[in-house]
Amino acid sequence: MIKLHELKPFPGSKHKRKRVGRGLGSGHGVTATRGTKGQKARSGGAKPEWFEGGQNPLYLRIPSKGFTNIFKKEYHLVKIQDLERFDNNSVITPEKLIEAGLIEDNKKEIKILGNGSITKKLEVHAHKITKKALEKLEKVGGKFVKLPPLKKKFRKIKKSKQKK
């Protein structure tokens, strides 16, 4: 059985501390293991890992603001379970959805999602509907009426007037 006072580190696992820059007799004098000349040999010459030697660094090459798709479609999403609050055999238009508080305004297209279930027969007027929502609506005898797409307002680029 080994005792605590008999414990020793493995041979070769312990090294003498390297004392650099302590004169020629130390074996690490003169250049202090830095080699001769060059940026890394001088004081304050250490550069961070991401330094690219004067080249425009990666963090400046990557765009900071990102990308905005001007053609992105945004929808008011309405779950089919939320339509359960309306009376049986009623016609649901965007105006009724605004009154009920399911959407805020009429500026985006309306998309009906198939989350939840429905038991009432409804006629839904919207721009889009998912397959699942359409199946659930038709299963209870409801009907979907597709509204025409809203027109997007793009900025007009003014053409400079050419003099003749």
Image (cartoon, helix red, strand yellow):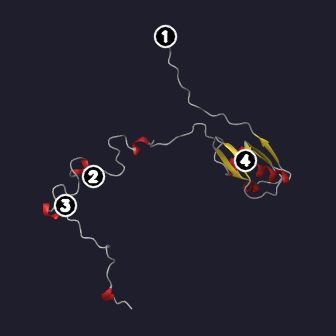
Which structural element holds mark 4?
helix
Structural distance between the alpha carbons of marks 2 and 3: 19 Å
Looking at the image, the residue that sits furthest to the bottom is 1
Structural distance between the alpha carbons of marks 4 and 1: 54 Å
Residue behind mark 2:
46
Closer to the eye: label 1 or 3:
3
Three-letter code, disc 3: His
Residue behind mark 3:
28
Q: Residue at x 73, y 36 (%)?
A: 148
- Give coordinates of residue 110: x percent, y percent: 69, 45
- Give coordinates of residue 109: x percent, y percent: 68, 42
Q: Residue at x 74, y 58 (%)?
A: 116
Q: Which one is nearer the viewer's eye here, 110 or 24?
A: 24
Numbered mark located on residue 163 in the image: 1
Pointer 2 or 3: first along the chain: 3
Which structural element holds mark 1?
loop
